Image (spheres, rainbow, N blue to C red):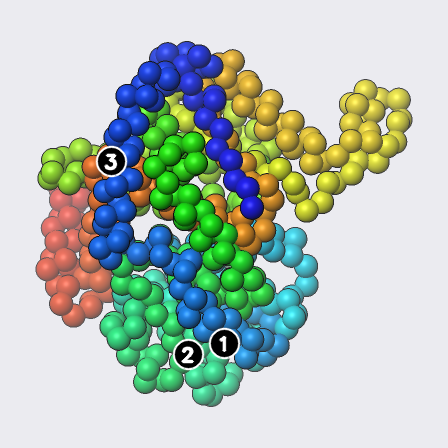
C-alpha cells in the first residue's frame, strides 16, 4: 500500500509569496504541528474521540463479516436509510470499490446493488421504492441518535412497504444505531431487527469504519477486513511526529498555512478518478462540519471554516477550471491522483490522417487522464494558484481504507491547529430542533414558537 502527498506546488517559489508558503514559514510552524499531534493523541487515548481506534476493532469486523455471509444470496438490493455521515461513507465505499452508477452492471443476488435513501424528497423516495423488489431487498437503517427526522420518516415508509409485501420484517431489517439508547434502538429491539452498535465517541462524519459504513459495505461484497487493514497501517504513520513520515500531519500543516496565511478560504477536492468521486462528497461533509465553527476553544467568536468544493477531473476542466484559473485567487486545490488504474483504456492504433485523432492513436486513457491532471496543475502554477497532490498507488480496499483514515486524521489535526473542537456540530443542531418543533414533536414546543417569531419577522419585512 502506498499513498503520497506532494506539497511542492503550495510553495512560494512555485506560485509566488502572495499565494504560496515559504520554507521558513513551514519551519517556524513545525512546533505547532507537533503540539497539534500531541494534543489530539492525548484526547484520543482518553477516549474522547474514537475514530483512530476503529481499524483495530477485530470483534466487530468479524461479527459483521459473519452476518453478511449468513444472509448473502437472499437479496439483490441493499437499501440504506440514513443521511449525512450515515449515508456518505457507504456511498464512498461503494463508488470507490465497485465504481459509480450506472457502470456497475446488472444487479443480482451475487452482485447486489446499493440504494441510498438520504433525502426526504417524496418523488425520489417513491421512485426508489418502485425500483426495488421487497422480496429481495435488505434494509439497513442508520441513525446514531435514533431519532433523526429524515431517517425516521423515510424508514417508516420503507418499513410499511416491507410489511405490506412480506408481513413480518425482522429478517429484512438491520439497525445501526447507538446500542441501548434512542428510539431506533428501542424499535429494533422490540421488532427483533439485527442490531449493530455505533461507538458513542465517534461522530457521524467520522463513522465510515464503524458499522455505519462497514455493514453496507460487507453486504454488497466489499472486503471490510482489507479496508480496516489499510486504515490500521496508515494509523501508525499518523501518530508519527516526523512530518516526512506523517502525511496527514504534513498535509494539515500546509493546508493550515495556505488557508490562514495566504487567505484561501476555499479548498477544491479534485479527484482524477470516477471511483473517488463519492469520496469527494464524503470529504466535503467531513471538512465542512468539522472546521466550520463559530467559536474556538477559548470561547472567542471566530467564525472559522474553509469551504470544500468537489470537482471531477478531467470532467470539470470543462466546467470549472476557467473560474479556477482566471477568477478570484481564493482557493487551494488538492488533486487526488491514481497511479495504477484497473484498466489502461488502450486507444486503438488507428491512423486516419487527422491530427486530433492520430496524436492519440496507440496511447491510453490512463496516460491521457494523468496528462490532463499534470497539465492542469502546471497551468495553475503559471497563474499563481496553489495546489497539491495526493497519489494513491491504486483504488482498492486497502488504499481506500487508508485514504479515508488519513483524511480523518488530517481533519482532526487541522482542528487542533485552529484551536477549535472539530467534533461538535452546534450549527446543525438548531435546524434539527426547529424541524422537530414544526413537525410537532413533544418537548420541542419552544422551537415551534421560535419559528413562529421568525415567520412574523418575515411577514413584517415584506
Q: Position of residue 280 (x, y in %)?
A: 47, 43
Query: Distance of mark 2 from mark 1, alpha carbons?
Result: 9 Å
Q: In whole angstroms, how far apart are the C-alphas of marks 3 and 1?
A: 42 Å
The reply to whether callout 3 and callout 1 are in contact (CB within 8 Å) is: no
Kindly identify which residue carries mark 2: 194
Relative placement, left or right, of 201 versus 450 is right
Q: Is residue 100 visible?
A: no
In the image, 458 versus 179, the foreground residue is 179
On residue 155, which mark appears? none
Q: CA distance from mark 2 to mark 3?
A: 43 Å
Nearest the viewer among 461 and 258 is 258
Which of the two labelled residues, at mark 2 and mark 3, occupies the earlier sequence position?
Answer: 3
Q: Residue 105's spot in the image, x, y percent? A: 68, 59
Secondary structure beneath dot 2 equals strand
The answer to whether marks 2 and 1 mark residues whose Cβ atoms lie closer than 8 Å is yes
Q: Which quarter of the picture shows residue 307? A: top left
- Residue under circle 3? 35
Circle 1 packing at 10 Å, graded few (<14), some (14-19), many (20+), is some
* Lower position in the chain sequence, tag 3 or tag 1: 3
Instruction: Judge the density around disc 3: few (<14), some (14-19), many (≥20) Cα neighbours within 10 Å.
Output: some
Furthest residue toward bottom: 167
Q: Secondary structure at mark 3?
A: helix
In front: 62, or 423? 62
Which of the image's four quarters has the C terminus? Answer: top left
**Disc 3 or disc 1, which is closer to the eye?**
3
Where is mark 1, residue-wise?
Answer: 67
342 is higher (above) or lower (below) than 86? above
Amino acid at each position: 500500500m502506498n499513498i503520497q502527498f506532494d506539497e511542492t506546488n503550495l510553495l512560494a517559489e512555485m506560485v509566488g509569496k502572495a499565494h504560496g508558503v515559504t520554507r521558513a514559514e513551514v519551519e517556524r510552524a513545525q512546533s505547532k504541528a507537533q503540539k497539534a499531534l500531541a494534543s489530539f493523541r492525548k484526547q484520543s487515548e482518553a477516549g474522547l474521540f474514537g475514530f483512530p481506534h476503529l481499524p483495530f476493532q477485530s470483534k466487530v469486523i468479524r461479527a459483521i463479516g459473519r452476518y453478511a455471509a449468513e444472509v448473502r444470496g437472499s437479496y439483490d438490493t441493499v437499501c440504506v436509510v440514513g443521511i449525512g455521515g450515515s449515508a456518505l461513507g457507504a456511498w464512498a465505499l461503494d463508488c470507490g470499490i465497485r465504481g459509480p452508477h450506472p457502470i456497475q452492471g446488472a444487479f443480482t443476488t451475487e452482485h447486489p446493488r446499493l440504494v441510498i435513501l438520504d433525502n426526504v424528497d417524496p418523488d425520489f423516495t417513491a421512485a426508489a421504492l418502485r425500483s426495488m423488489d421487497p422480496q429481495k431487498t435488505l434494509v439497513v437503517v442508520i441513525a446514531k441518535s435514533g431519532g433523526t427526522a429524515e431517517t425516521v420518516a423515510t424508514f417508516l415508509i420503507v418499513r410499511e412497504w416491507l410489511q405490506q409485501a412480506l408481513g413480518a420484517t425482522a429478517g429484512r431489517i438491520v439497525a445501526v444505531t447507538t446500542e441501548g439508547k434512542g428510539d431506533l434502538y428501542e424499535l429494533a429491539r422490540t421488532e427483533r431487527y439485527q442490531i449493530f452498535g455505533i461507538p458513542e465517541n465517534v461522530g457521524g462524519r467520522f463513522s465510515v469504519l464503524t458499522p455505519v459504513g462497514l455493514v453496507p459495505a460487507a453486504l454488497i461484497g466489499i472486503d471490510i477486513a482489507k479496508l480496516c487493514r489499510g486504515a490500521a497501517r496508515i494509523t501508525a504513520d499518523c501518530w508519527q511526529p516526523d512530518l516526512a513520515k506523517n502525511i496527514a500531519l504534513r498535509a494539515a500543516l500546509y493546508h493550515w498555512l495556505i488557508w490562514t496565511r495566504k487567505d484561501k478560504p476555499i479548498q477544491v477536492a479534485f479527484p482524477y478518478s470516477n471511483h473517488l468521486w463519492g469520496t469527494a462528497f464524503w470529504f466535503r461533509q467531513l471538512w465542512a462540519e468539522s472546521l466550520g465553527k463559530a467559536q474556538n476553544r477559548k470561547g472567542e467568536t471566530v467564525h472559522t471554516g474553509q469551504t470544500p468544493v468537489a470537482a471531477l477531473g478531467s470532467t470539470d476542466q470543462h466546467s470549472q477550471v476557467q473560474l479556477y484559473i482566471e477568477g478570484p485567487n481564493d482557493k487551494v486545490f488538492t488533486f487526488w491522483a491514481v497511479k495504477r488504474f484497473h484498466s489502461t483504456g488502450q486507444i486503438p492504433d488507428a491512423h486516419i490522417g487527422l491530427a486530433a485523432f492520430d496524436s492519440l492513436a496507440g496511447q491510453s486513457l490512463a496516460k491521457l487522464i494523468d496528462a490532463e491532471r499534470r497539465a492542469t496543475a502546471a497551468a495553475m502554477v503559471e497563474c499563481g494558484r496553489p495546489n497539491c497532490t495526493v497519489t494513491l498507488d491504486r483504488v482498492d480496499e486497502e488504499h481506500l481504507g487508508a485514504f479515508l483514515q488519513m483524511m480523518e486524521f488530517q481533519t482532526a489535526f487541522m482542528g487542533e491547529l485552529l484551536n477549535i473542537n472539530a467534533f461538535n456540530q452546534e450549527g446543525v443542531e438548531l435546524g434539527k430542533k426547529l424541524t422537530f418543533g414544526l413537525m410537532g414533536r413533544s418537548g420541542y414546543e419552544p422551537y415551534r414558537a421560535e419559528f413562529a417569531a421568525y415567520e412574523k419577522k418575515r411577514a413584517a419585512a415584506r
